[in-house]
């Protein structure tokens, strides 16, 4: 077989992969929180025919050096990276929130997760919660099955838990006085409407019926409940936690606007914190997709031409092989 055909076949595969990435980007141009993926190429392996050698020079003779002679075998996928650039916030109203800055909402499929990896479901106080009071435990968050998202489409479920329609939203609870001290900010829980007007949550008890649920720019979720005497009381569910990573591009997309992390990945250190210190929530907003259609269509054109050029090489190689075969006839 001709090397040119091998190179062209590798070029077809690589350009097809890039077309797949571009098509996925364009398909998600209106998907809230979607982050564009970028595809790059790299050269394939080489066959060395002549090694590079240095010249020889002495009192009797002088010989010139020679450069290497190599044949290439086309192209391969270099990398597929995710562009985590913040996109334009879009106002949609309701119980929605957008992170203005870096970070992700922390969610989980279970309403109870503890630092030892135990999980449960249904009603409850959230078990022992997840301790995030020191670096070692903070990093262990990546091994507890949390899903991270930029899309803050929130709602209350039938048991009073704050969810995004799929997973439970995790955050920090206030203390008995409704304040947040260092101790209370050391444990993550699934946020839930309290079971009494004093703001406490009793295991196995139904949450109060909440109305007028709101989120402020500091991520604090409040709701109005009715007291036994018929008066309205505002209660606090807690403050939504925001996860930050040393290398957020190291997160893996897991579908449905979620990202996953593991202890062995390339995200580096992570932390769970509340809004503030340069991060705030925009209540009623959702982050739009950061897909640049003009760039995607320009890449689509150049990638299509690259694909066509490689098909032409295969056609020419086929004609050469056909001529060689016809020589025998």
Image (spheres, rainbow, N blue to C red):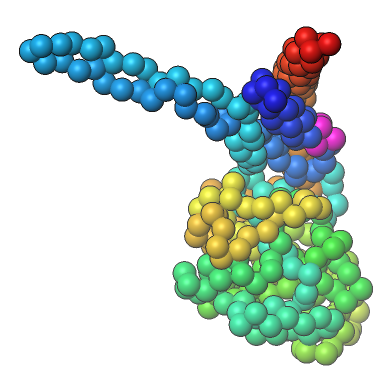
Q: In front: 105, or 48? A: 48
Measured as percent of width and height from the top left, residue 119 is found at 73, 81
Highlighted range, magenta: 22-27
Residue plotted at (74% across, 68% down):
108
Measured as percent of width and height from the top left, residue 228 is found at 88, 85
Q: In front: 263, or 11? A: 11
- Name the quadrant of the C terminus: top right
Residue 208 visible: yes
Instruction: Answer above or below: position of 178 versus 103.
Output: below
Horizontal side of residue 21 vs 79, given as left or right: right
Residue 90 visible: no
Is 23 inside the magenta-drawn segment?
A: yes
Residue plotted at (88% across, 77% down):
159
Residue 170 sits in quarter: bottom right
Residue plotted at (26% across, 21% down):
54
Q: In front: 326, or 190? A: 326
- Name the quadrant of the N terminus: top right
Measured as percent of width and height from the top left, residue 273 is found at 57, 62
Instruction: Answer above or below: position of 214 versus 72.
Output: below
Horizontal side of residue 188 vs 245, given as left or right: right
Residue 117 sits in quarter: bottom right
Instruction: Answer above or below: position of 14 versus 326.
Output: below
Residue plotted at (67% across, 49% down):
99
């Amino acid at each position: 077989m001709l090397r040119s055909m091998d190179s062209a076949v590798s070029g077809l595969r690589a350009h097809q992969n890039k077309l797949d990435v571009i098509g996925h980007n364009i398909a998600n141009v209106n998907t809230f929180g979607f982050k564009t993926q970028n595809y790059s190429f790299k050269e394939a392996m080489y066959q060395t025919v002549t090694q590079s050698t240095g010249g020889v020079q002495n009192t009797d003779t002088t010989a010139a050096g020679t450069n290497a002679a190599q044949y290439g075998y086309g192209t391969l996928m270099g990398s597929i990276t995710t562009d985590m650039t913040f996109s334009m916030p879009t106002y949609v109203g309701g119980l929605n929130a957008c992170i203005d800055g870096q970070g992700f909402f922390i969610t989980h499929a279970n309403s109870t997760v503890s630092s030892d990896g135990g999980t449960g479901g249904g009603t409850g106080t959230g078990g022992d919660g997840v301790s995030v009071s020191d670096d070692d435990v903070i990093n262990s968050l990546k091994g507890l099955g949390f899903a991270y998202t930029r899309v803050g489409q929130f709602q209350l479920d039938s048991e009073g838990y704050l969810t995004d329609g799929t997973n439970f939203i995790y955050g920090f609870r206030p203390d008995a006085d409704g304040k947040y001290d260092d101790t209370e900010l050391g444990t993550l829980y699934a946020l839930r409407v309290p079971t009494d007007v004093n703001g406490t949550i009793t295991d196995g008890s139904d949450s109060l019926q909440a109305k007028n649920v709101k989120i402020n720019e500091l991520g604090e979720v409040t709701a109005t409940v009715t007291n036994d005497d018929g008066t309205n009381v505002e209660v606090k569910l807690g403050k939504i936690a925001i996860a930050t990573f040393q290398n957020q591009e190291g997160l893996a997309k897991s579908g449905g606007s979620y990202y996953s992390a593991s202890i062995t990945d390339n995200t580096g250190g992570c932390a769970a914190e509340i809004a503030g210190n340069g991060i705030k929530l925009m209540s009623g907003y959702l982050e739009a997709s950061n897909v640049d259609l003009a760039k995607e269509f320009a890449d689509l054109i150049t990638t299509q031409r690259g694909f066509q050029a490689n098909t032409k090489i295969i056609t020419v190689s086929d004609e050469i092989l056909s001529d060689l075969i016809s020589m025998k006839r």
